[in-house]
Image (tube, coloured by chain):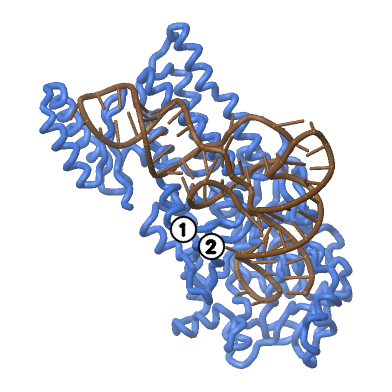
Amino acid sequence: MSLFIYNSLGRTKEKFEPLHPGIVTMYVCGPTVYGHAHLGHAKSYVSFDVVVRWLRHSGYRVKHVQNITDVGHLTDDADEGEDKISKQARLEKTDPMEISQFYTRSFYEDMDRLEVQRPNIAPNAAGHIPEQIDLIEQLIKTGHAYAVNGNVYFSVESFPEYGKLSGRTDQEALQSGARVEVRSEKRHLSDFALWKKAEEGHLMKWSSPWSIGYPGWHLECSAMSMKYLGETIDIHGGGMENKFPHHDCEIAQSESVTGKPYVRFWMHNNMVTVNGIKMGKSLKNFVNLKDLFNIFDPIVIRFFILQSHYRSQLDFSDGAIRASQSGLEKLQETYKRLVTAPTYSGHLPYEELTKVKLTLQTLEFDKKIKEALNDDFNTPIAISVIFEFIKNVNSVLDEHGKLQEQTAYSAITFLETYAGEVLGILKSREGLMATEGRYGGKIIDEVMNVLLDLRAEARKNKDFALSDKIRDQLLEAGIEIKDTKEGASWSKKSAT
RNA sequence: GGCGAAGUGGCCGAGUGGUUAGGCAGAGGUCUGCAAAACCUUGUACAGCGGUUCGAGUCCGCUCUUCGCCUCCA
């Protein structure tokens, strides 16, 4: 069974084979660190995290590079020429470096909580100025770039394929709607900056052969991708909004220098809307992850994201997340039930054996879920397979109250592999058994066992007043009791 | 204006030429001392209008609507 990936370059699903057998080189556009991460970051990085996890699960060594953009892109508002990080630094009356460090840490905090595995290499743009200057020099030398007044521009006309990713290939047509050209030092309106001379008061600047200034917006990805992964990489991921101009510019810069394909597979994830509307700074509807995590468990957000396909727009709403939360709880509960279910060795009576074997036949589920993930990382389908599976697990446990050892083992393995290792939506066994954290989960477990024993005894003596009192009071304390065939169990009720 | 995506049952959200997506919510039932949970049953949805086809949410055309990008943005 082969993996097929939708390649934005060509807009079709293509069979994926890495350039070098066994090793996948992958670059994902990272965040600009001038503010806390929001829901859009979550969607992007959770999606690509599953890509990495699935490739690794499939046996590849994945070399995953994700940049940190700490050289701010230019802002478009009144503070002309000032970049985002400089601006934020001025607002916060501090050093740009401090800003980018602060938000870099904040970013990883949030990603960690979302169970996003960290990249192998996380290079930052400010730390790779020489590499970027070097790339510009090569572009000038080969006639693809020119310097004017301390600025350097890439000459779009020198790269006939410019725009091939986004489909914006006809540069003349693109210009036709534009206003009569303001006298520009650029040779062509579509030419883009590789190096900008720093204006008065610009905080982040470096010396270069052309001026004291800073690199253009698109350069860092090309420079760092080629430095750490080579001239041609297997996968480059990013948000759809970056197709043009960012990714098209990357292609132009890189391929002009190397003469080789820059990226074999371009993957673009789609955007988040909030209650049906684009999430945008101007609309003031950015959903900050730190705020969101106060309301919902980060793993619920992760699950919510993976319930839709990475190439689809995802609409965020309170109701939708709540629905996901209920669904995920069911999955977690079933896993817990499975892990704690009594098992027995030996054989089942014939009719039970056939039933259990048929219903918990994991091979079939294994095949289905592999097919889904190999089909352009179709996580919604993968999740639906997991739900079918847990329904069968519950069904068998409802009927028998116990599982044959081998069945239990393969069922647990199935969940831990796909829901856990690949999708990252399963809480660890320890996390399920105890209340999280440092407050002595183990002790609480033991106290709960005492309470549950007492209640079981009360029920046995038909002292329902007492047993209900225990149940009701625990519920008030946020602990829910469930009576199943395998005995009573408890779980923390979700906050909402 | 240019480039692109999409309109699916109460909600979210897959799929795609003929067979159940899945989750949440709802209804009925089983189980239970009661409840919760779980399980079983239940929903004949694919924007509208034409066309292709033995057969279309699924392909084609038109219409309507929504959304994204073209300016920093995941």
Q: Is A56 placed above or below B34 here?
A: below
Q: Nearer the viewer, residue A438 or A172?
A: A172
Work out how far the residue at label 1 is from the one at label 2, CA to CA, in angstroms.
8 Å
Disc number for residue A161: none
Instruction: Say which quadrant the N terminus of chain A sits in.
Output: top right
Q: Tell me the chain of label 1.
A: A
| Chain with colour brown in the figure | B
Q: Is A348 placed above or below B33 here?
A: above
Q: What residue does disc 2 label?
A: A276
> Dot 2 surroundings within 10 Å: few (below 14), some, or many (20 or more)?
few
Q: Position of residue A274 (x, y in %)?
A: 50, 63
Residue drawn at (76%, 72%), measured in percent from left and top?
A: A134
Q: Colour of chain A?
A: blue
Residue drawn at (82%, 72%), measured in percent from left and top?
A: A138
| Secondary structure beneath label 2 | loop
Q: Position of residue A50 (x, y in %)?
A: 58, 47
Q: Is residue A197 visible?
A: yes
Q: Nearer the viewer, residue A150 or A58?
A: A58
Q: Nearer the viewer, residue A23 or A313?
A: A313
Disc number for residue A317: 1
> Dot 1 surroundings within 10 Å: few (below 14), some, or many (20 or more)?
few
Residue drawn at (78%, 56%), measured in percent from left and top?
A: A9
Q: Amino acid at mark 2?
A: Gly
| Secondary structure beneath label 1 | loop
Instruction: Give yes or no for contact between labels 1 and 2 (Cβ–Cβ under 8 Å).
Output: no
